Amino acid sequence: LLMAVGEDWVPVGDKDYLYGWSWRVYPDESRSGGGSDDVFLDGENLYILASYWNIEDDVTEENGIYRVNISTNETVRMSEREAMAFKREGDFLYYLNEGALYRVSIKDGKEEFVKQLAQPSVDISGFEIFGGKCYWGKIENEGYYIDENYYNSEGYYLYDDDGKIVNEGAAFLGMKLAGDKKEYLICTFAETDSSKYRIVIFDASGAAIFKSSDTAQIGSMHIIGKTLIFVNRTTGTLCKANL
């Protein structure tokens, strides 16, 4: 873990930790994972995914959320359980473990159980915290995949905080917070016969304030003020709409 100081890069944290990865060690001692963008800086405290990994002794511990002081290098574990991703809203860090949603206070470090979203065996893939509610993706069949060219994603659906499918019958593609103050949640869905809407936007109250049958990649969608701007994937045209 490095920090830019002037024109130099200075090591931060503890060398025995693997920072910025969703990393898992399995019972057979095999390992796998990938880089994570879940990180934010609050004053001198950096919150980031990490796991202890002493390479010389080959000792590891399960992945979790850590607080790293960029001045003292102090590294403190925040999550009590394994965390492979986290989201921040207000003074809390949210993460999922075995179908349950937990949150950790960045003020006092206390962790609390929020709610059980699904059975522990359910494969939750991706989540977002918005307006105090959790929106999460669930893979319904083992043959699911997304192809960037053809958007084959049947079997992946988006659920709300109450465990109800968002946009019934539509295969989920992606979601992100948007707006000047991240006051909107944009959700995109695949272009299939069963999907009436391919774009749905929620406000902080949970109301769906915009729906469209147009197709778009989540990365091309932006909200400035109350204006939605995106590129229609089918026609290649730039589109604008008032929210």
Image (spheres, rainbow, N blue to C red):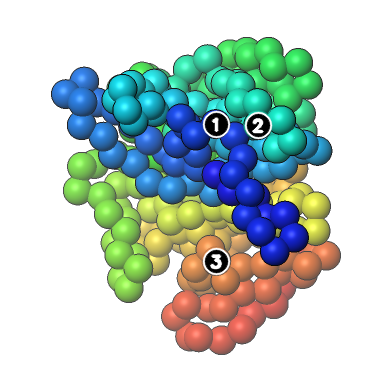
* Dot label at residue 163: none
Residue at the spot of label 3: 219
Quarter holding the N terminus is top right
Mark whose residue sits in front, 3 or 2: 2
Q: Secondary structure at mark 3?
A: helix
Gap in angstroms between the C-alphas marked 3 and 2: 34 Å
Residue at the spot of label 1: 14
Q: Quick check: 63 left or right of 66?
A: left
- In the rendered image, residue 215, in percent from the top left (x then y), is placed at 48, 70
Residue at 30% across / 47% down in the picture?
155
Q: If you read the primary sequence from the N terminus, does the residue marked by circle 1 or circle 3 appear first? A: 1
Q: Nearer the viewer, residue 157 or 110?
A: 110
At label 1, which amino acid type do we have? Asp
- In the rendered image, residue 92, in percent from the top left (x then y), is placed at 70, 27
Tag count in the figure? 3
Q: Secondary structure at mark 2?
A: loop
Dividing the picture into quarters, in which one does residue 99 lie?
top left
Q: Residue furthest left?
A: 28
Q: Quick check: 239 left or right of 82?
A: right
- In the rendered image, residue 231, in percent from the top left (x then y), is placed at 57, 78
Residue at 35% across / 23% down in the picture?
60
